[in-house]
Image (tube, rainbow, N blue to C red):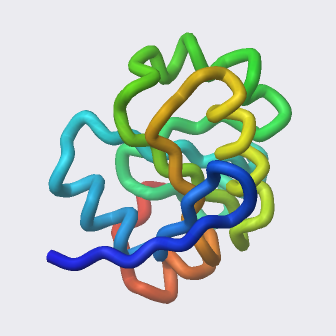
Amino acid sequence: MFWFWKKSGPGVVTVSAQEAYDRLQADKQAKIVDVREPREWDSTGTPSKAVRISLGNLARKALEKLPAKDKPVYVICASGHRSRTGAKTLLKLGYTDVYSVSGGMQAWMRAGLPVKR
């Protein structure tokens, strides 16, 4: 399968929602982190098997909830802006395989990808 990605600032790679989903299915050690706020999780749901850590708590809780720094981590938010910030935060914490999901949950839901409510 061919995947296309692009850089979104220093060290941050951006992938589409479909690419993130496909990669998560192919690699069971990969994680997806939803950095939105709890009210957003409640209103739309989250990607299946998402680790929910709001952006404001990411630096403090990442090591606890994402212990493997060398495994792929896909960061998603509502539209793609906070996910880039979250991805940069994870890179600063020493995570080495980090991706921002372009278009966020809006793109995820438009693609008809699974959501857990």
Q: Residue at horizontal 45%, vertical 57%?
A: 47
Vertical relation: 8 (above or below) 65: below
Q: Residue at horizontal 48%, vertical 69%?
A: 15
Give the total of numbered labels: 0
- 29 vs 111, left or right, is left
Residue lying at the far bottom of the rendered structure: 110
Q: Residue at horizontal 15%, vertical 76%?
A: 1
Vertical relation: 18 (above or below) 93: below
Residue 105 in view here: no
Q: Position of residue 62 (x, y in %)?
A: 61, 22
Residue 55 in view here: yes
Q: Residue at horizontal 39%, vertical 63%?
A: 20
Vertical relation: 34 (above or below) 17: above
Nearer to us in this view, 30 or 14: 14
Q: Position of residue 85 (x, y in %)?
A: 78, 49
Nearer to us in this view, 90 or 7: 7
Residue lying at the far front of the rendered structure: 10
Tell me where residue 50 sits by quadrant.
Answer: top left
Q: Position of residue 106 (x, y in %)?
A: 62, 79
- 102 vs 28, left or right, is right
Q: Position of residue 55 (x, y in %)?
A: 78, 40
